[in-house]
Image (cartoon, rainbow, N blue to C red):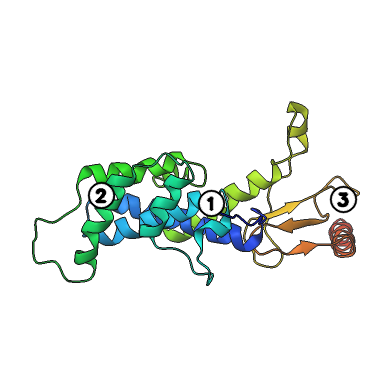
Amino acid sequence: MLYMTLDLWAPDHVRRQVMRQARYALNVAVLDEDRVPPEGPFDVALTNGLLAIIAAIDPVAVVDRRGLTLPASALLPRASALGLSIDQETLANGLQLTQPLRHGRADDEWIQLESKHVTALRALDEMDGLGVLHHVAAHRTVDDMMVTLFSEKAEAYAERDVRRVKDLLDVMEPEECDDCFRRTFVPLGYDDSGGTMAVGLCIACGYQRDEDTARDMYLTEQWELKWQHE
């Protein structure tokens, strides 16, 4: 299989991954609570979970020649081919069980998912690209989950080049983006007063604050501070 190199920190990839992670986590939570028919949440969680873990290795590996994302039935063998430790047989069986129920073809009420299917689905969370189920207890809505995951991505981006303990002192806290207003803007330096009105970029929308913009914002901020104290 040929893989194309693609920046794992490209904003469109980051957004897709966050949306996949959120839908995996929240649909698994619904399955755990047994509040709705399980076939829909299982299918959504499986597809988005597989997309997230495979795309964490290579974003191009989850799309076909037309650029459309692959269905779960195609993602399962691809994940196994990549050497990912998934229970392909159990997950494929669960997927097969969901189809007649999802599409209104089922005529046997005893055809249903079992606990082993949900267990295999939850096990995906142990892989790179997911690791998100621990957020569910505190974040039960899509919006809350998205905010948390975007912040987590921004923190990981800020820390990506940290190699020594002392470098942790220079890790920048993510801030609200001037353009998309997500808390995913990562300053890449300090201003003249030691603050963070400096150049940087947003990992979610791709907005980049250049030197001229940063300087103008810094001077405006300093003027406002001076005016407030006079």
* SS type, badge 3: loop
Amino acid type shown at disc 1: Leu
Task: Sort mark 3 into few (<14), some (14-19) or many (20+) by Cα contacts within 10 Å.
Answer: some
Write the residue at 42% across / 39% down: 85
Write the residue at 82% across / 55% down: 197
User: Residue 190, image x and y in percent?
Assistant: 84, 47
User: Residue 159, image x and y in percent?
Assistant: 69, 40
Residue underneath mark 3? 191
Relative to 78, is 127 above or below?
above
Q: Residue furthest top?
A: 165
Q: Is residue 178 left or right of residue 36?
A: right
Q: Is residue 97 left or right of residue 198?
A: left
Q: Which of marks 1 and 3 precedes in the sequence?
A: 1
Residue underneath mark 2? 33
Amino acid type shown at disc 2: Glu
Q: Are marks 1 and 2 in contact (CB under 8 Å)?
A: no
If the image is split into quadrants, where does the C terminus sit? bottom right
Residue underneath mark 1? 149
Please state which of residues 198 and 217 is positioned toward the viewer in this rendering: 198
Write the residue at 49% across / 53% down: 52
